[in-house]
Image (cartoon, grey):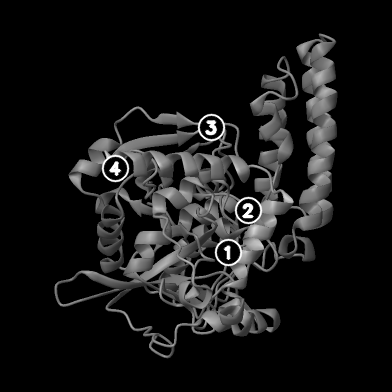
Amino acid sequence: MRKLLIITFLALGSALFAQNTKNLTEDVVNSIRDNYKQKSEADKGIRNALSNNDIRSLAVNRDVVGKADHQFKYKADVKGICDQKSSGRCWMFTGLSSLRPQIIKDKDLGGFEFSQNYLYFWDMFEKSNLFLEIILQNADKPLDDRTNEWALHNPIGDGGVWNSFANLVEKYGLVPNTVMPETYHSNNTSWLNLLLSRKLREDAMQLRDAKAQKLAPKKIDEMKFNMLCEVYRYLVLFLGEPPTEFKYRFEKEEAYKDYTPMSFFKEFFPNYKTSDYVMLMNDPSREYNKVYEIEFDRNVLEGKNWLYVNLPADELKKAALASLKDKEPLYSSCDVAKFLSKNDGTLDVNNFDFESLLGMKFGMDKATRIRTFDSGSSHAMLLVAVDVDDKDVPTKWQFENSWGSSYGHNGYLTFTDEWFNEYMFRIVVNKKYLSGDVQKMLDQKPIVLPPWDPMFAPEN
C-alpha cells in the first residue's frame, strides 16, 4: 500500500511539474537558474575555454591523435585528386572518378580528368525540363499541393545521386576536361542556380496560367520550347556551349582523332553498362531486404529514378570488400561532417569526446538520428580501399574525396569500420559482387517513396 502511495505521489508530482513548466514563467526560469548555480563554479573553466576556442579543438581525443594509419591491404588503382570547388557536384565528380582508373590504365597516362562542366551543363538543362514537366503535370492542383511545393522550393540544383550520373552518361556520353574546361560558374555554382531557379519559377507560373486558361496543348508546348531555348542560352553564357564533336589526342599520341561525346565514351568503355550497377542503402529506420524507389528523384525526364536495396551494414561491407579485392572502386555516400578530422584525414567516432567536455550524453542510434533529422547522407566520394584483420574482416576503409589534394590525407579520408556502421549510407556496386539472395531482391516491385523524404536530399 505504501509503495502504491509513493508511486501515485510521484506521478502526481511529475504531472504538476510538467504543467507548471509548460510556459517559461518567471518562477520556472528562476528555478532553472537556481539549479544551474549548483554547477556554475565547476563549469567556469569550460565556459571560458568554449568562449575563445572551436569546440572541436577542445574535444580532440588525445587517445587517437597521431595513430592514423593510411595503409591498406586492398586498394583500387586510383590516381589523382579532383576538386569540385564551391559547387555541389560531388556525385558527378565521384561518378566520373569511378571511370578514370580504367582510361588511365588503358592509355598509360600520368593522370586524366573528364569534363565535369560538360555533364553539369546537361544536368542543369535536363533538370529544367523535368521541373517544367512536373509543373505541367500538376497544374490542376493548388500551389500548396505537396508536389508543387516540393518542386517550387528547389526547381533545380547541382546536387544529385548515382542515378543522376547514370542518366547523363547514357544520354550524352563523356568528353575530356580540356575539351570543355571548368568556368568560374561551374566551380562556383550558387548564382547560376539562384537566377535560373528564379526564372524557372516564373516560367512555372506562366505555364500554370496557360493551363488554367485552357490554351491549346500545341500553344503550351510552344511556350515551353521557348522557355527551354532561353535556359539553353543562359547556360551557354555561364558554362560555354557543349561540343557535339571534337578532336583529341592522348599523351604520347601524335595524331588527333575525331570524336563525338558518345563515341568517346563507347570507345573507352565498350562494355560499361550503368544497368550492371545497383545502389545498396543502409537505412535502419526502414525495413531491410526491400527495394525502394524515390518518385521524381532523377534529372532526366525519361531517365531512371533513384532506386536502392535497403540492407544491414554488414551486407554493404561484403559487397564493397568483394569489389575492392577486384580493384574496382565504388561510388559511395555518407554523413561526412560527423567526427571528421580534416588535419589527419580521418573519420572516427572517437576523434572527438564531446561528452566528457560538456558532461552531456548523446545516445541516439543510427535509426533515431535519421528519424530526427540529426544524420543523413550529405556527400558522395569514391570508396577506394579497405584494410582487414587476419580473418579478412574489415578494420578500416578509405575514400578518394573531391575537395582537392590539400584536404585531409593528400585528398583522401580514412575511416574506421565502426564509423562505417554509424555514418555510411550508400554504395553503388556491380551486380556481380552481390550475393544470390541480394540479387533476387532486385526482382521485387519497388516501394515508392516521396521525393521530400528527409533521407533523400541530393548529395553535394
User: Label 1 near label 4: C-beta < 8 Å?
Assistant: no
Which amino acid, by three-letter code, is at mark 3?
Pro
Compare residues 186 and 175 and report the one nearer the observer.
186
Compare residues 138 and 53 and report the one nearer the observer.
53
Up the image or down, 330 lies above or below 342; here it is: above
Which amino acid, by three-letter code, is at mark 2?
Leu
Q: Quadrant of residue 291?
A: top left
Mark 2 or mark 4, earlier in chain: 4
x and y percent of residue 167 in the render?
Answer: 53, 43
- The quadrant of the rendering that contains the N terminus is top left
Q: Which residue is mark 1?
A: 114
User: Label 2 near label 3: C-beta < 8 Å?
Assistant: no
User: Label 2 near label 1: C-beta < 8 Å?
Assistant: yes
Q: Which mark is residue 119?
A: 2
x and y percent of residue 452 in the render?
Answer: 58, 37
User: Nearer the observer, disc 3 or disc 4?
Assistant: 4
Q: Which residue is mark 4?
A: 2
Mark 4 or mark 1, earlier in chain: 4
User: Label 4 near label 3: C-beta < 8 Å?
Assistant: no
Q: Residues within 10 Å of mark 3 (few under 14, many from 20)?
A: some
Up the image or down, 103 lies above or below 23; here it is: below
Callout 1: SS: loop
Q: Quadrant of residue 361?
A: bottom left
Residue farthest toward the front in the current orientation of the protein: 2
Q: Which residue is mark 3?
A: 450
Which amino acid, by three-letter code, is at mark 1?
Phe
Compare residues 163 and 154 and report the one nearer the observer.
154
Mark 3 or mark 2, earlier in chain: 2
User: Nearer the observer, disc 4 or disc 1?
Assistant: 4
Residue at point 76%, 65% (across, down): 183
Q: CA distance from mark 4 to mark 1?
A: 77 Å
Up the image or down, 227 lies above or below 418; here it is: above
